Image (cartoon, rainbow, N blue to C red):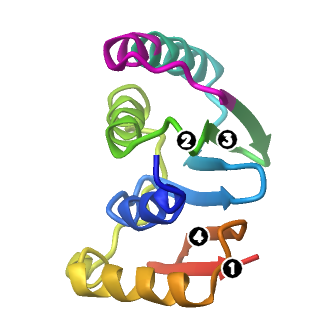
Amino acid sequence: MKSTNGIELITASLDYPELNMVKYDGINSIITFEIALISEKVDEQKLFERELNKCLNTYDKLRGVEPITRYIKTKSIRGLCLISFHRDIETVNREELKLFIKLANSFLSEFLIKNDLNYPDAINNKQLKRSLLDQIYKGSKTKSSYLVYRQNGRVIFHNR
């Protein structure tokens, strides 16, 4: 897999208002996708995690891939629940991100906090994404780390 896979997955993640945060740790080669839920519904979370793991195991078998890093972490903070999906950058792909989002919508849609924009074309604009990639490539080393999150309908991008 290309060493730029993490950066490309960051731009792909801009298409999903369900994602609360995306973190790319270039040093450890791990990308984290996070969703936020309005409540701490433990039963729904457990069911989601179980089904996600089943689907990911099947998906990996079909692809013939053995993930280096794949785990889910759940954290509750003052009535919110954050579910983080951690993956190694060498074996993850866009289709796996889509699977994570589709399952989150299937099992947790009524609890998901989506940061929908009133102007989705601005964020899904291919030229904007290409410009973002070009900016990152110019100033980055292959071992950089990035944090992307949404705040009040805006995407915040931070090179750490």
Which of 63 and 16 lies nearest the eye of the viewer?
Answer: 63
Label 2's element?
loop
Label 3's element?
strand
Q: In the rendered structure, which amino acid carries the disc numbered 3?
A: Cys
Mark nearer the viewer, 4 or 3: 4
| Residue 87 on image: x %, y % | 60, 38
| Residue 45 on image: x %, y % | 58, 23
Of the residues under marks 1 and 2, which one precedes in the sequence? 2
User: Which label sits on residue 148?
Assistant: 4
Residue under numbered circle 1: 159
Residue under numbered circle 2: 90
The answer to whether residue 150 of the structure is visible from this angle is yes
Q: In the rendered structure, which amino acid carries the disc numbered 1?
A: Asn
Q: CA distance from mark 1 to mark 2?
A: 20 Å
Q: In the rendered structure, which amino acid carries the disc numbered 4?
A: Val
Label 4's element?
strand
Mark nearer the viewer, 2 or 3: 2
Of the residues under marks 3 and 1, which one precedes in the sequence? 3
Neighbours of disc 3 within 10 Å: few (<14), some (14-19), many (20+): many
Position of the C terminus by quadrant? bottom right
Q: Is residue 34 above or below residue 75?
A: below
Q: CA distance from mark 2 to mark 3?
A: 28 Å
Mark nearer the viewer, 4 or 2: 2
